[in-house]
């Protein structure tokens, strides 16, 4: 479901689908496995994501918190304008590299 690849020493996670309650468990498990394996340079590519609900935001925040323990920041790329606006409204842009 989630496309995961390594590029230039960083892990790029591309869900390609809306990050909502029905898929959050699977996405969170895949990202948690990466962090537990010591992969802390994580980029989430939001291309193809049209919506993120509160559970999806929870996954982004949990991922940020996990990798922050390793002095890293979660990076988000290809952010659709509506999602970018939501992240800025919630002031998450101050915590994520966008």
Image (tube, rainbow, N blue to C red):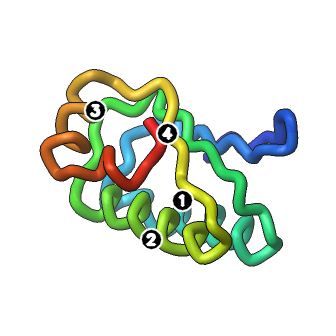
For label 3, the SS is: helix
Q: How far, Cα to Cα, is label 4 from label 1?
A: 15 Å
Kindly indicate the quadrant of the structure image that contains residue 21: bottom left
CB-based contact (under 8 Å), mark 4 and mark 1? no
Q: Earlier in the sequence, mark 4 or mark 3?
A: 4
In the depicted view, which residue is nearer to us: 48 or 75? 75
For label 3, the crowd category at 10 Å Cα-Cα, with few meaning under 14, some 14 to 19 and many 20 or more, is some
Tell me: residue 55, above or below residue 86.
below
- Mark 4 closeness class: few <14, some 14–19, many ≥20 residues within 10 Å: some
Q: Earlier in the sequence, mark 1 or mark 2?
A: 1
Left or right: where 57 falls relative to 59: left
Please state if 63 lies on the left or on the right of 34 as rendered. left
Q: Residue at x 34, y 57 (%)?
A: 56
| Labels 1, 2: front one | 2
Q: Which residue is mark 4?
A: 76
Which residue is tagged 2? Answer: 62
Which of the labelled discs sits on residue 27, or is there none? 1
Q: Which residue is mark 3?
A: 84
Of discs 3 and 1, which sits in the foreground? 3
Quick one: label 2 or label 4, which is nearer the N terminus? 2
Residue nearer the viewer, 81 or 55: 81
Alpha carbons under labels 2 and 4: distance apart: 14 Å
Mark with earlier residue (4, 1): 1
Which one is earlier in the sequence, the residue at label 3 or at label 2?
Answer: 2
Q: Residue 10: which disc?
A: none
Give the Cα separation between the discs numbered 3 and 1.
Answer: 20 Å
Of the two numbered discs 4 and 1 in the rendering, the one whose residue sits closer to the viewer: 4
In the rendered structure, the answer to whether residue 17 lies left or right of residue 58 reads right
Q: Residue 81: which quarter of the image?
A: top left
- CA distance for labels 1 and 2: 12 Å
Which residue does the image show at 27% across and 34% down from the upper left?
Answer: 83
Image x and y of residue 38, in percent = 80, 70
């Amino acid at each position: 479901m989630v496309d995961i690849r390594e590029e230039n020493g960083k892990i790029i996670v591309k869900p390609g689908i809306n990050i909502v309650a029905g898929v959050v468990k699977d996405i969170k498990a895949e990202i948690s496995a990466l962090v537990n394996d010591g992969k802390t340079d994580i980029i989430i590519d939001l291309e193809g994501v049209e919506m993120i609900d509160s559970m999806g935001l929870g996954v982004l925040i949990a991922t940020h918190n996990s990798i922050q323990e390793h002095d890293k920041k979660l990076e988000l790329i290809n952010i659709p304008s509506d999602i970018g606006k939501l992240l800025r409204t919630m002031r998450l842009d101050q915590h994520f590299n966008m």
